[in-house]
Image (cartoon, rainbow, N blue to C red):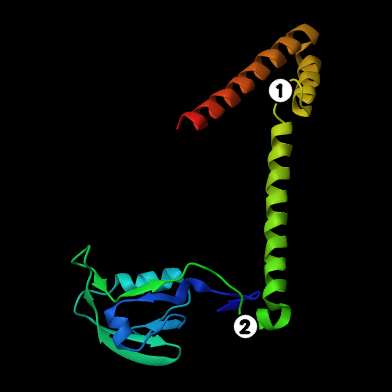
Amino acid sequence: MPRDGLQDDRQVLGGLGKHAAKLGVIPGLKITAINDASVTDHDAFMAALDALRPGDTVFMTVNGVRQSFIAGQNPTDQNKAWIGLQFDTEQGPTPAAVASYGNTGYAAIMGSITLLIFIYALSLGIGLFNLLPLGPVDGGRMFQLAAERILGDKRGHQVWKYLGFFFLGLIIVNLTIGFVR
């Protein structure tokens, strides 16, 4: 189903087994129904497949054409059906997007969106790190002022110092664990 210039890839065939190949099913076709149950998303597709057993007759609507075949036996689980379909997990531009923007324009738009998402995530991470109650960052100064106002100068400064060392220790432990693994 087209959305925002992309093709919903969850129902688009990417590879085939012998059952699908016998039907003339080729990569790029869309499955819209299995056993007369509408297949609108990945969950509906998987639910329809889970209901099948080896030897069942399968009625599949592919690009508007209803076809039937017998489900085979899954080589890894003998109790599950095998229809020999594999799905593409890549998304790409629809023909309308290519016609409107061209391949280069589409790549530029998707690259810009990816860059903006990366900048957003980076800014959010830096902002949250800046709020930690460590001495040299803003969160440390805010916590120090609040602790000294609530607990008094001497006690507030001690609490701020110990909490700052605690968070610094957590950061060091997390970095060490990340490099050890």
Question: Which quadrant is the N terminus positioned in?
Answer: bottom right
Residue 20 % position (x, y)? 32, 82
The disc labelled 1 sits on which kind of residue? Leu
Query: Which residue is rendered at x = 70% and y = 28% of the image?
Result: 132
Determine the residue located farthest toward the bottom in the rendered image.
65
Q: Where's the C terminus, which quadrant?
A: top left
Q: Is residue 74 above or below residue 40?
A: above
Name the residue nearer the viewer: 38 or 115: 115
Tag 2, which secondary structure?
Answer: helix
So how many labels did they put on this image?
2
Query: Which numbered tag is attached to residue 134?
Result: 1
Q: Nearer the viewer, mark 1 or mark 2?
A: 2
Which residue matches tag 2?
95
The local secondary structure at tag 1 comes to loop
* Residue 122 position within the rendered picture, expressed as x and y whole percent measured from the top left: 70, 44
Residue 111 at x, y percent in the picture: 69, 62
What residue is drawn where x is 48% and y is 67%? Answer: 89
Q: Is residue 71 left or right of residue 10?
A: left
Q: Is residue 163 above or below residue 93?
A: above
Q: Residue furthest front?
A: 104
Quadrant in the picture for residue 26: bottom left
Vertical placement of 36 versus 44: above or below? Answer: below
Work out whether 173 lies above or below 122.
above
177 to the left or right of 57: right
